[in-house]
Image (tube, rainbow, N blue to C red):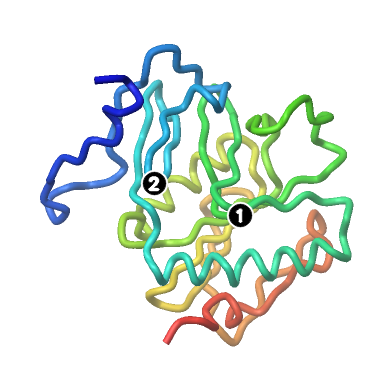
Amino acid sequence: MSAASSYEEPVPLPRGGLRFPVELAAPPGFKAAVEPTWPRVSGRLEYLKGSLHYIPPCGDEQSEVAVGVAGALDQWAVDHPEFSVGANEAGMLLGGEVRGADAAVWRRKDLPPRAKRGTFRRVAPILAVEIAGQDEDEDVLLLKARWYFKHGVKIVWLVLPETREVLFLRGGMRGARRLKTNERIPSDADLPGLEPLVSPFFHQLR
């Protein structure tokens, strides 16, 4: 069996007794900084503490909220071309580890020229956004927020579909603000004019 096909062979596991992310063995020739060497799987991968970590594809609510978040950021970016907005597990290589954000915002002047397509960004974004789902609840995302702050991210939004809230964190884990649907995300000097209402993030949920 080839290394590639071994990642596609299904193994039945009791989901209720399984906690994600699950560690995967790296394929031969794997290099964290070289995206084409990553295994092809149906789901999401990150490289953390020397190991590949797997999370299943996101569910329906999480995917619908992701569209609302990306739409708000994209609309803002049209009027702020000095920033680069990434989504769809925007990959970043920081401190020798690779993680993907549901959405992230970089200042363009901080980014090096693009050498080739498909490379991970090696500069911390100003903003990282994570959306809770079946396998990534608030506690899991708070741990990821700590990682972001440790590696230079300034602002983190944790978007929580189950409660229709956004947990806003700025500069660290202290002073978090829990925002309801009728509130706006606070503006910040590092992201001028970015203060969307929370409610449009969840407009597709019923």
Find residue 101 and report its horizontal and vertical position in percent: 55, 48
Quadrant in which the N terminus appears: top left
**Is 4 or 205 nearer to us in this picture?**
4
Where is 204 relative to 73, above or below?
Answer: below
| Residue pictured at 80% horizontal, 35% vertical | 111
Q: Which amino acid type is shown beneath numbered disc 1?
A: Ala
Report whether 132 appears left or right of 34.
left
Location of residue 27 in the rendering, given as x and y in whole percent from the top left corner: 36, 19
Q: Position of residue 187 (x, y in %)?
A: 75, 67
Quarter location, residue 110: top right
Outermost residue, top side: 29
**Which residue lies under the disc numbered 1?**
103
Left or right position of 83 against 12: right
Q: Residue at x 11, y 51 (%)?
A: 14
Q: Residue at x 63, y 55 (%)?
A: 170
Viewer-closest of 60 and 125 = 60
Residue denoted by label 2? 43
Query: Secondary structure under badge 2?
Result: loop
